[in-house]
Image (cartoon, helix red, strand yellow):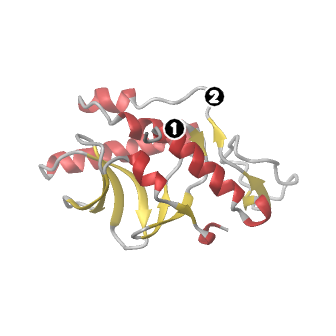
Amino acid sequence: MALSICEQLDNFVSSYVENASEGVLSIPYDEEWPSLCYNSEGEQGLQGQIVPWQPVKQTQPLSFDNVGSALELTLDSDYCIYFTRYFSNNLIATAPQGECELLQVWNEEDFERLQQNLIGHLLMKQRLEQAPTLFFGLTDEEDFILTVINKTGEVALEQVGMEPKEILAPSLAIFLSTLKPSSASR
């Protein structure tokens, strides 16, 4: 039986943390960009000091309801779960097709920014008379993004402003199952 999106995401995040250099992920501390992900704060006045971090499950999941109602669109449920399960820095991974960066939300403000960008993306798709897609990752090819086709839940490779170029997986959960944490993330 196939694992759910929650199980696949949990498995990938656990593997990502386990495969970090010496088991520790690190990032420059930014007091102006707070997050539950920081394992410690930088010393007073040392903005940019390298500190450990890790993905943290959201205790009160965020919601895409305002995006759906603003655009009169029901968003793919796996896509919504993907962004409302963890607070995390973006995660670098290797897919069978190459390197990719899985977008994540660092804090509630970042989630709001994601929603605004998603609305802009969906309005562009409407203007171009293309089916709605939902972005969730970047690739190592310029102008190519990873998207979920909203109607089918399939994961696609899409050039910005164009119809999806290639179907990569039948679902987001199956796509996540094909990924390996990348050494480029350390």
Image spot of residue 181 (x, y percent): 58, 62
Q: Amino acid at mark 2?
A: Thr
Q: Looking at the image, which residue sits at the far left? A: 129
Q: Amino acid at mark 1?
A: Cys
Image spot of residue 59 (x, y percent): 63, 28
Q: Residue at x 25, y 31 (%)?
A: 73
Q: Residue at x 47, y 52 (%)?
A: 176
Using the rendered view, name the quadrant where residue 45 is placed. Answer: bottom right
Q: Earlier in the sequence, mark 1 or mark 2?
A: 1
> Is residue 110 visible in this depiction of the protein?
no
| Residue located beneath label 1 in the image | 6
46 is higher (above) or lower (below) than 186: above
| Residue located beneath label 2 in the image | 59
> Is residue 155 visible in this depiction of the protein?
yes
Image spot of residue 91 (x, y percent): 56, 57
Q: Disc 1 and disc 2: Cα gap in Å?
A: 14 Å
136 is higher (above) or lower (below) than 83: below
Using the rendered view, name the quadrant where residue 92 is placed. Answer: bottom right
Using the rendered view, name the quadrant where residue 132 is placed. Answer: top left
Which marked residue is nearer to the observer: mark 1 or mark 2?
1
